[in-house]
Image: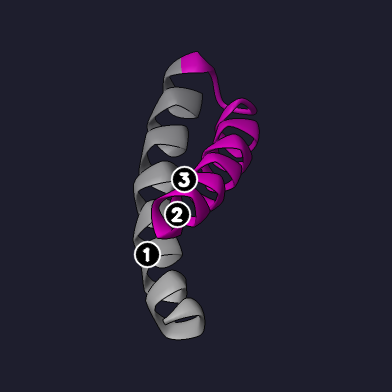
Amino acid sequence: MGFFFALIVSSLAGGIGWWIGNFFGIVAALLCSATASVVGYYYGQKWNREYFG
């Protein structure tokens, strides 16, 4: 269950990163999306451990 929670948070963060980066071009969108996905996965795992045991 924790993996799916982290995956959802990572996907949402990646989508937001893509949206922000798209204002500057496709390469910026890709880099922002990848960075936001990694950060989202980290925080998804962290929140999963804190709130769901």
Q: How is the image coloured?
A: one colour
> Residue at image x 42%, y 66%?
43
Asked whether 18 falls inside the magenta stretch, the response is: yes
**Disc 1: CA contacts within 10 A as few (<14), some (14-19) or many (>=20):** some
44 relative position to 18: left or right? left
Q: Which residue is more in the foreground, 38 or 32? A: 38
The tag on residue 7 is 3
Q: Label 2 is placed on what type of residue?
A: Ala
**Disc 3: CA contacts within 10 A as few (<14), some (14-19) or many (>=20):** some
Residue 27 drawn at (x, y percent): 42, 18
The answer to whether marks 2 and 3 mark residues whose Cβ atoms lie closer than 8 Å is yes
Q: Which residue is more in the foreground, 31 or 50? A: 50
Report which residue position mark 1 lands on. Answer: 45
> Residue at image x 43%, y 24%?
30
Nearer the N terminus, badge 1 or badge 2?
A: 2
Residue 42 drawn at (x, y percent): 34, 60
Asked whether 27 falls inside the magenta stretch, the response is: no
Element type at marker 2? helix
Q: CA distance from mark 1 to mark 3?
A: 9 Å
Q: CA distance from mark 2 to mark 3?
A: 4 Å
Report which residue position mark 2 lands on. Answer: 6
The tag on residue 20 is none
The answer to whether marks 1 and 2 mark residues whose Cβ atoms lie closer than 8 Å is yes
Q: Which residue is more in the foreground, 24 or 42? A: 42
Q: Which residue is more in the foreground, 3 or 43? A: 3
Q: CA distance from mark 1 to mark 2?
A: 5 Å
Q: Label 1 is placed on what type of residue?
A: Gln
Q: Which residues lie in the magenta part?
A: 1-26
